[in-house]
Amino acid sequence: MALHSSTLSFGCVSFSPQASFIRKSTVKASVFPSQHPVSFPRFRLQGKALESNNGSVENDESSLVVCFGEMLIDFVPTTSGLSLADAPAFKKAPGGAPANVAVGIARLGGASAFIGKVGEDEFGYMLADILKQNNVNNEGMRFDPGARTALAFVTLRKDGEREFMFYRNPSADMLLLEDELDLELIKKAKIFHYGSISLITEPCKSAHIAAAKAAKEAGVILSYDPNLRLPLWPSAESAREGILSIWDTADIIKISEEEIHFLTKGEDPYDDNVVRKLYHPNLKLLLVTEGPQGCRYYTKEFSGRVKGLKVEPVDTTGAGDAFVAGILSQLATDTSLLQDENRLRDALSFANACGALTVTERGAIPALPTRENVLNAILKSVS
């Protein structure tokens, strides 16, 4: 049975206590994403996509970003400032930080792929199709017949900030096996991006470590966004230890002020000396996001701050992922940005705008901007 187009809509859904919103999948193997070839546009901030002899756009695999980890369904209340119990309805939206980054890069015109596991259920197949529709290579996705696709209910406070309630007991993303990894896809990446949620439980933890090791040995740049979600960890200390356990292997790290405060056990995240404690010897770039204020950047040679784009926030879900997509999409095509402060600052202005535009709509993936949207917003802000 093919997926009907209505299955892929992201309207509002209402729930009652008696509702069973995940039913056993009747989707047949004929809709496995491996049977749907994916093409990619090539991305340059200045330049055009390459065309083949038949006029179609070809993917430049030399700038491929492979994102590893979880993909899930976010249910976001349609009314801000209410508890989950009081929310009248929820907007269903695809999410999961690594998947958000993959879609964000593709929407900006870059080449990306996603590796992770979802349930062999209707939500899992829907997510695979969402990736395909957004020109993300989904050949590295796996489907678990014995576990469901993860869900997250996300409450929106009046200021647009979020609180989470996760349904993972266990969810399929936690059950990815090392021998299910598409190592060839990983090895041909320019950048391998991941978070820390995939480190919480086995067997996914071992798969994560093996994937990063294969990427490192192949000369791939490692990008890490810890994406702290304390409710998913057994304890705060286990979260701190888990996040820091792979810290020194990353080439690029993006963290928030909240994460600095957590990882340093309460030190001031605005103090450059505190931030520098997190800068390990092999790190090429450390980025600190500051929400609407923009971001800070640190390399061995220079550091500074880039102002953000002012917008009216609706939902901050996915803002950090959009920022990551914005910077990785540019670094994947030109790593020399890491040595040129002026050009890096321009790239970070672009990334800040990506994050800002994402908070103007509900949900993560539905709100991720196109390259044209971002450039227009930047031009409007300086005019």
Image: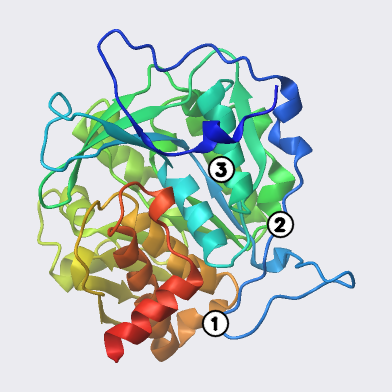
- Report the amino acid beneath label 1: Ser
Give the residue furthest to the top.
18
Q: In this view, does 146 lie to the left or right of 226?
A: right
Q: Nearer the viewer, mark 3 or mark 2?
A: 3
Distance from disc 3 to disc 1, alpha carbons, whole Å, reads 32 Å
Q: Mark 2 points at which residue?
A: 188
SS assignment at label 2: loop
- Report the amino acid beneath label 2: Lys
How far from the left and from the top, in percent, is residue 20? 38, 11
How far from the left and from the top, in percent, is residue 339? 47, 84
Q: Mark 3 points at which residue?
A: 130
Q: Is 262 rendered above or below residue 179?
A: below
How far from the left and from the top, in percent, is residue 239? 28, 37
- Whichever of labels 3 and 2 marks the residue nearer the N terminus, that label is 3
Distance from disc 3 to disc 2, alpha carbons, whole Å, reads 23 Å
Q: Residue at x 43, y 39 (%)?
A: 10
How far from the left and from the top, in percent, is residue 334? 58, 78
Q: Is 88 rendered above or below residue 331?
A: above
Q: Which residue is drawn at 59% across and 66% down?
A: 110
Is the residue marked by circle 1 packed among few (<14), some (14-19), or many (20+) residues within 10 Å? Answer: few
SS assignment at label 3: helix
Specify the label residue 148 is tagged with: none
- Whichever of labels 3 and 1 marks the residue nearer the N terminus, that label is 3
